[in-house]
């Protein structure tokens, strides 16, 4: 193991505590905890056995008092607060593991990236699919050319349960869609050119929060003519469900067909003669004990890899693999889908640019943001 890190954590709901417990188990120390809600801090101190740490209810104070003391921050507050909570830590040059999305508003996302710049050494975003062994294997198979040119991709993310009453979400597509929007961009190595979407209320579902619907379908095309679809819902009553189909001209890859929860994660490669290719593999989910958030078994491994990588990159000075830059792209994608669903499925054109001024101008021209 490398150096023992001293961490601060701001945002102590479900996932904040998951991240804190993982880094503790990996041999690192939590030295400061914070949340806007004092009760969340107290609950986390108990659960993490961290009674003696410094506590905060204000990220700016935490950043100033802990600068020079902590090596890294984990920020997992409400989505709408991510950018505002992260900024003081960026300004005090503390590396941050920041939960997705960047914020829930595209205008604010651009303003944040403009404020901190494109430097990829500041923030690693919590898009854990980037570190997931089954999806990394899937990406390797696509890159090897095994299934030929990709015709179609379908990324499915279905929760089993509604979010907790504490949760805040601007909408299903922005909140949960960002995971699979990024997954599609990574697997295809392409940014969508056109997006349209619908959001629905299905029967017999009730949620403590209003996020505009419980099920959404996002359709997109890419410059190379791939047809894509993101299926999102909070209603998969038999367990948390993450699947990806990639249909190529010479075969299909199906990652994560539902096989029980927690259960095996199949990466199946199907050949034109209808048989399974030997590169097919099975990955295992974690099997946590006691009470746990529903996403933990599927992604425990990915979170662990993401934290290891985060620390290794801080120590070596290497750029983080998923930063404010990559999530801005996913954020543009989901903004288009969210707006389309609100406007009866109208089609939005998408473009991305390395230059932020051009990127912002294109988003305004494409109807994704108001002009400033
Ligand atoms: N990467 C992932 O797999 C993943 C999974 C879940 C959530 N997230 C993201 O992480 C962020 C936080 O999500 P979450 O699921 O942890 O939300 P959450 O509702 O559990 O917590 C959010 C906030 O609610 C308040 N809260 C929670 N429990 C409380 C308590 N016992 N007492 C008082 N206040 C309490 C706190 O202010 C807390 O910061 C969101 O941006 C979400 O999009 C990511």
Image (spheres, rainbow, N blue to C red):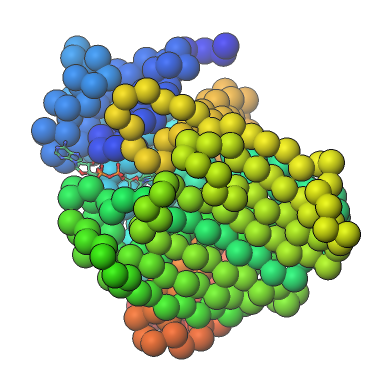
Q: Residue at x 16, y 40 (%)?
A: 36
Q: Residue at x 66, y 74 (%)?
A: 227
Front position in the image: 232 or 360: 232
Measured as percent of width and height from the top left, residue 91 is found at 36, 40
Q: Is residue 310 visible?
A: no
Q: Is residue 328 above or below residue 44?
A: below
Task: Residue at 44%, 63% (x, y): give it.
Answer: 232
In terms of image quadrants, where is residue 305? top right
In the image: residue 81, left or right of residue 188: left
Residue 219, position as x, y percentages in the image: 55, 75
Q: Quick one: quadrant of the C terminus?
A: bottom left
When the figure is inspected, residue 55 is found, relative to residue 320, above or below; the finding is: above
Q: Residue 45 in the image: x percent, y percent?
A: 20, 21
Q: Above or below — where is 17 with respect to 84? A: above
Q: Nearer the viewer, residue 103 or 180?
A: 180
Quarter holding residue 272: bottom right
Q: Residue furthest left?
A: 39
Residue at far right of view: 273
On screen, residue 354 versus residue 148, left or right, reads left
Image point 50% across, 29% down: which residue? Answer: 286
Picture quadrant where residue 353 is located: bottom right
Q: Position of residue 107 (x, y in %)?
A: 37, 68
Q: Nearer the viewer, residue 64 or 142?
A: 142
Asked if residue 190 shows in the view, the reply is: yes
């Amino acid at each position: 193991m490398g150096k023992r890190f001293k961490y601060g954590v701001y945002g102590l709901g479900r996932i904040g505590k998951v991240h804190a417990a993982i880094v503790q188990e990996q041999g690192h120390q939590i030295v400061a905890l914070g949340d806007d809600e004092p009760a969340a801090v107290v609950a986390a101190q108990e659960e993490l056995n961290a009674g003696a740490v410094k506590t905060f209810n204000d990220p700016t104070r935490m950043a100033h008092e802990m600068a020079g003391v902590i090596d890294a921050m984990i920020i997992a507050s409400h989505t709408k607060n991510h950018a505002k909570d992260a900024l003081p830590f960026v300004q005090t040059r503390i590396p941050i593991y920041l939960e997705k999305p960047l914020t829930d508003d595209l205008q604010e996302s651009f303003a944040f990236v403009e404020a901190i710049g494109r430097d990829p050494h500041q923030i690693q975003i919590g898009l854990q699919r980037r570190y997931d062994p089954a999806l990394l294997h899937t990406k390797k198979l696509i890159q090897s050319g095994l299934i030929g040119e990709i015709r179609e991709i379908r990324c499915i993310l279905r929760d089993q349960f509604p979010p907790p009453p504490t949760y805040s979400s601007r909408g299903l597509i922005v909140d949960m869609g960002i995971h699979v929007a990024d997954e599609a961009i990574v697997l295809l190595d392409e940014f969508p050119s056109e997006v349209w979407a619908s959001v629905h209320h299905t029967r017999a579902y009730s949620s403590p929060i209003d996020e505009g619907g419980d099920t959404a379908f996002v359709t997109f095309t890419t410059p190379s003519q791939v047809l894509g679809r993101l299926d999102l819902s909070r209603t998969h009553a038999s367990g948390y469900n993450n699947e990806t189909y990639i249909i190529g001209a010479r075969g299909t890859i199906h990652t994560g067909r539902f096989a029980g929860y927690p259960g095996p994660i199949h990466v199946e490669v199907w050949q034109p003669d209808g048989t399974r290719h030997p590169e097919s593999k099975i990955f295992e989910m974690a099997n946590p004990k006691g009470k746990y958030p529903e996403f933990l078994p599927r992604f425990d491994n990915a979170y662990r890899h993401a934290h290891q990588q985060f620390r290794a990159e801080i120590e070596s000075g290497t750029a983080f693999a998923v930063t404010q830059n990559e999530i801005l792209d996913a954020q543009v994608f989901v903004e288009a889908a969210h707006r389309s669903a609100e406007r009866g499925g109208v089609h939005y054109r998408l473009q991305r640019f390395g230059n932020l001024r051009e990127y912002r101008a294109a988003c305004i021209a494409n109807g994704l943001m108001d002009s400033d």
